[in-house]
Image (spheres, grey):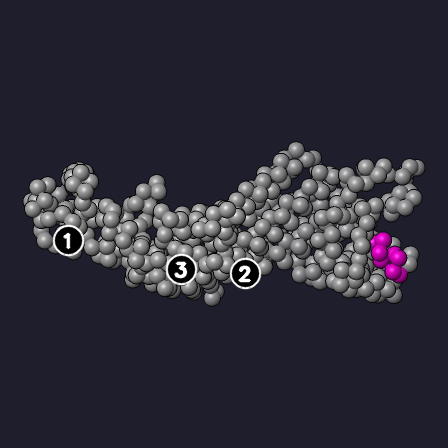
Amino acid sequence: MSKLWGGRFTKETNKLVEEFTASISFDQKLAKEDIAGSLAHVQMLGECGIIPKEDAETIKQGLLKIKEKVDQNEVEFLVEDEDIHMNIEKLLIEEIGAVGGKLHTGRSRNDQVATDMHLYLRTKTTEIIKLVEDVQLSIIKQAKENIETLIPGYTHLQRAQPVSFAHHLMAYFWMFERDKERLVDSLKRINWLPLGSGALAGTTFPINRGKVAEILGFETIYPNSMDAVSDRDFILEFLSIGSIIMTHISRLSEEMVLWSSQEFQFIELDDSFCTGSSIMPQKKNPDVPELLRGKTGRTYGNLIGLLTVLKGLPLAYNKDLQEDKEGMFDTVETLEGSLKLLAPMIETMTVNKDIMRKAINNDFSNATDIADYLVTKGLPFREAHEVIGKIVLYSIQSNKFLLDLSMEEYKQFSDLFENDIFEVLAPEHVVAVRNSFGGTSPNQVKQQIKLAEEKIQQ
């Protein structure tokens, strides 16, 4: 039989079964991790005397040659060899002869594939942390330039209160900071070593799992072999964190789409991040943030897909677990592509400060400050709230805004109003007096940016 496991079988595998069950089309992405795990495993086998040291050295050299070929894209992986593990082992035997068959001593494809994915996600999670940080740095850069820039703050997509544009942007910094913390924390669970667990019950060979963990840089060894080969929690956690990151990217992207529209005109995206229309020459479409918003759905799907695969699986390994990889790879690629685009898009966008300011002048987002003003004069807040509601209604009916009203008009609603009300209603004052920790005043925003920079440097 041509299969490395074919001794038990009397018939060749049906070609349709081969194609349906093979994973090499996607798990070849794990080639480098698979070789790294094998190099650590064979070193341990040699040092423990499980195989002769000269055999271990021969296998090591053979694996290094295969790695070199993989790095140079000189390897053709075959469907009939099923997966990356069998492909590498076949290549090894072809390279060094029958001694290559000793590599699989004391391990199974079950603990081997789990190890590969731990190694892969450890690398990718570390890289994605850096990409998230790049986005944070681009936010800080824009925020520093727009501390005094005022923009309407919204609730229910209705203008609520004026805020510093830097303050608005920095809200996303903290979202991404929590994402980064989640990624960092997940490394503690990614960094568990499954290798040495065998198919599910361990091995009869006197292996040294601690040595393998040391070589590969794992901090923890799975204490239960059945858990080790069937655990995919670390992938679920990554997919969950990835979905949350994409949620934050999508929210920011939605705002960029709105802000760059003709109706808002608060920002203009750099031409290099937009496209045109095939029929309408005047169009400048925010395709990148739209697509970032759209790609969020696929990360959600990858998470739900793996949850569904795992929910009914008995211990230990089941072929269903082959479905764990494509979603993981896709979420990694989606995150990498999205974060790499988002950072420069934020950094290069043009902020239309005058249009933002005009929007604030032409709304009622300073109404709350009139209520606070009356409260300081002794009027209970609920009564003040009613007074302001009547003033706003009067202003709308008169086609005016709050700063357009005269003192005589204010006096119609309360004798508590004095000339200082106009100072209170000035947008800069409205923003400046919100000086509580975490508020939108320039002083607080500067402190917030300083805190953010300290977080980045830690």
SS of the residue under disc 3 = strand
Q: Nearer the viewer, mark 3 or mark 2?
A: 3
First reached walking from the N terminus: tag 1 or tag 2: 2
Q: Is residue 343 magenta?
A: no
Which segment is the magenta one? Answer: 89-96
Q: Earlier in the sequence, mark 3 or mark 1?
A: 3
Q: How many marks?
A: 3
Q: Relative to residue 193, is residue 291 drawn left or right? A: left
Residue at image mark 1: 422
The amino acid on which the numbered mark 2 sits, given as a three-letter code, is: Lys
Task: Give the percent coordinates (x, y) of residue 64.
Answer: 79, 64
Number of residues whose C-alpha sits closer than 10 Å to that of mark 2, classed few (under 14), some (14–19) or many (20 or more): some
Kindly tell me whether residue 127 is visible in this rendering: yes
Amino acid of disc 3:
Thr
Q: Which mark is residue 350?
A: 3
| Of 138 and 361, the residue lying toward us | 361
Q: Depth check: 105 or 453 in front?
A: 453
SS at circle 2:
helix
